[in-house]
Amino acid sequence: MNIDPHKLHVIRCYERLPPLPGGMERHIQELTAAQRGLGVRVTEVFNRGQPAGESAQVWPSWKLDQLRPYALRSALFYAAAARRNFELEHKRLQVVHVHGDWPAFLFGSLFARFIGADAVATTLHEWTRGPSELYRLSLKKCDPIFATGLREARRLATITGKSAIHLPSAPAELFFSPPKGRFTPSDVVVAGSLIPRKNVELVLDIAKRRPAISIAVFGEGPAGSHLQALCSQNGLKNVRFHGAVTPEALRSAMSSSKLFLSTAFSEGSPTVALEAMACGLPVVLTPSNDYSNIVDDGFNGRVTTNWSADELVGAIDEFLRDPQRLARASGAARQMAERHRWPAKARIVTDAMIEALERHRAVR
């Protein structure tokens, strides 16, 4: 590759930025910081939040993420972005990087053309809206294409006929650091929003079948009260709900546990699973996505074939009943997490952008 990262100017577009909670926002923040560390100039275009460097805010008095339909708010967002005066440098190549779904990709491509950007990159964080034809249309001019889920990356490649790069979010750096303080030890840790698609009721079924296994649940959401009521109704003494905690507290809790469990129906990027692996926890996951790039099945974790409580209990028993196997799986989990740190992700993204720019040069 002949283009120096210092000659890139990435205009990264997404409606929300930290300190708002959530995987997508942190993904954007961490990727931006890591690319800046490579010498890439990054301008964050956002509606609300707190950027950590060069940025441009649009519609500051509106909460665009609350507008419906999604296509309307994307149109408003990129129309406002087009009116901003970006300090473009002739010595740098501009890449507009759009995070979102097909409406953002469509209007983001128009925005990129309007400002004369050299390329437009996209990241799909989770497949949520629209038939295949809308993705084919909205991604027609986009290169490179990223997806945080492997299943979504493969689907986008099939739809568009282009390569789509699997880019799961990386664990926060604190999960690689020694924990501060200790949490009450538990055998199994569960972490995530308490919403129906996380399928935490299945965790309670597992707890009922294995009363000797202690399970710590972290997170909050609309299903929280219902889940705690079910615990009481079934007399489950081995499940403890801790609610929402700080990342530091979750790091301490994971370091005091033996295994991470997810029973979700659907997932995008398995960030919390990678965070658990960074803490040395093997993972047991349901097939809520394709995890073959992250889980060496039976070695650093297990991905079940379905959502059967019996199969999940069997997978948990494999590790907890064999201390030597658990120790080997713990080391393998840490090794896998090391491969997914943010500096490596930033290099993948930057190299893909440079390769796309070189392809564009070859066509011209």
Image: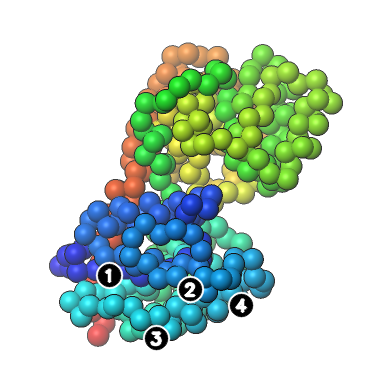
The quadrant where residue 211 appears: top right
Disc 2 crowd rating (10 Å Cα; few below 14, some 14-19, many 20+) is many
Q: Which mark is residue 72?
A: 4
- What residue does disc 2 label? 58
Relative horizontal placement of residue 16, taking residue 194 as reference (left or right):
left
Cα distance between the residues tagged 4 and 1: 27 Å
Three-letter amino acid code of the residue under disc 1: His
Q: Nearer the viewer, mark 2 or mark 1?
A: 2
Is there CB contact under 8 Å for labels 2 and 3? no
Cα distance between the residues tagged 1 and 3: 16 Å
Is there CB contact under 8 Å for labels 4 and 2? no
Residue at coordinates 39% horizontally, 86% vertically from top-left?
114
Disc 1 crowd rating (10 Å Cα; few below 14, some 14-19, many 20+) is many
**Mark found first going from the N terminus, 4 or 1:** 1
**Mark found first going from the N terminus, 1 or 3:** 1
Cα distance between the residues tagged 4 and 2: 15 Å
Q: Position of residue 241 (x, y in %)?
A: 67, 29
Three-letter amino acid code of the residue under disc 3: Phe
Three-letter amino acid code of the residue under disc 2: Val
Q: Quadrant of the N terminus?
A: bottom left
Cα distance between the residues tagged 3 and 4: 19 Å
- What residue does disc 3 label? 114
**Mark found first going from the N terminus, 2 or 1:** 1
Q: Position of residue 283 (x, y in %)?
A: 51, 32
Residue at coordinates 49% horizontally, 82% vertically from top-left?
79
Residue at coordinates 55% horizontally, 57% vertically from top-left?
126
- Is 358 rendered above or below residue 206? below
